[in-house]
Amino acid sequence: MTEPQWQQEPSPKKKLNLGLIVGIVVGVLGLAGGAVTALVVTLNDGGGSAPAAAAKSGDMLATAEEFVQAYNNALDSSDLAAFPLDDYVCAANHDDVAQPLKDGTAQRDGLRLSVRAVTLYVGGAEGNVTMSVEKQGRAHRELSVEATRTDGRWKLCDSKFDIVKR
């Protein structure tokens, strides 16, 4: 007698639950889109367009360049009265910026400033300006100064605003 041979029936192939996969993909894309939207709104200072954020950083760059030009002009002319500190520097930092001009240190050391970079922080009301300080015509160091948007205008405001640092 022959023994019966056992044959295993092929198991039915599992169907992919297409609805579940589509739902997961749509959910992930929705979350990613929401995150990007939230980031853009935050970067644009609570709404507004991307060009508005660019304009704010452009304004900060223009202010930094105007400050550097005015400072260098004050060095050339030795006329501190012509240097509009209030336009560019917070009141708390007036002495830090003006003292080297008043006592002649800046002129004696042959200091010159130039803007290297500006960085606009998330939110758009604060940033950082990096300047190069030259001494006697040679690169001396970089100076990094916080910038704050006050009354619609950028001002350089930083407790470490030391242009002459040796």
Image: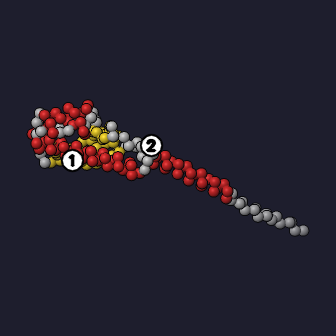
Label 1: how many residues lie within 10 Å, few (<14), some (14-19) or many (20+)?
some
Q: Quadrant of residue 109?
A: top left
Q: Is residue 40 visible?
A: yes
The first of marks 2 and 1 along the sequence is 2
Marks 2/1: CA distance?
A: 32 Å
Q: Percent from the top left, x then y, of residue 119? A: 33, 46
Residue at the far right in the pictured view? 1
Give the residue displayed 18% in from the left and 43% down from the top: 70
Q: Is residue 165 visible?
A: no
Going 59% across and 55% down the picture, which residue do you hit? 25
Check the image and name the residue furthest to the bottom: 2
Left or right: 14 with respect to 155? right
Question: Residue beneath label 2, please?
Answer: 46
Nearest-to-viewer mark from 2 and 1: 2
Query: Hey, which quadrant is residue 127 in on the image?
Result: top left
Residue 94, given in percent of the width and then of the height, sits at 22, 33
The residue wearing badge 1 is 114
In the picture, measured across the screen, residue 46 lies left or right of residue 142, that is right
Left of 9 or right of it: where is 44? left
Secondary structure beneath dot 1 equals strand
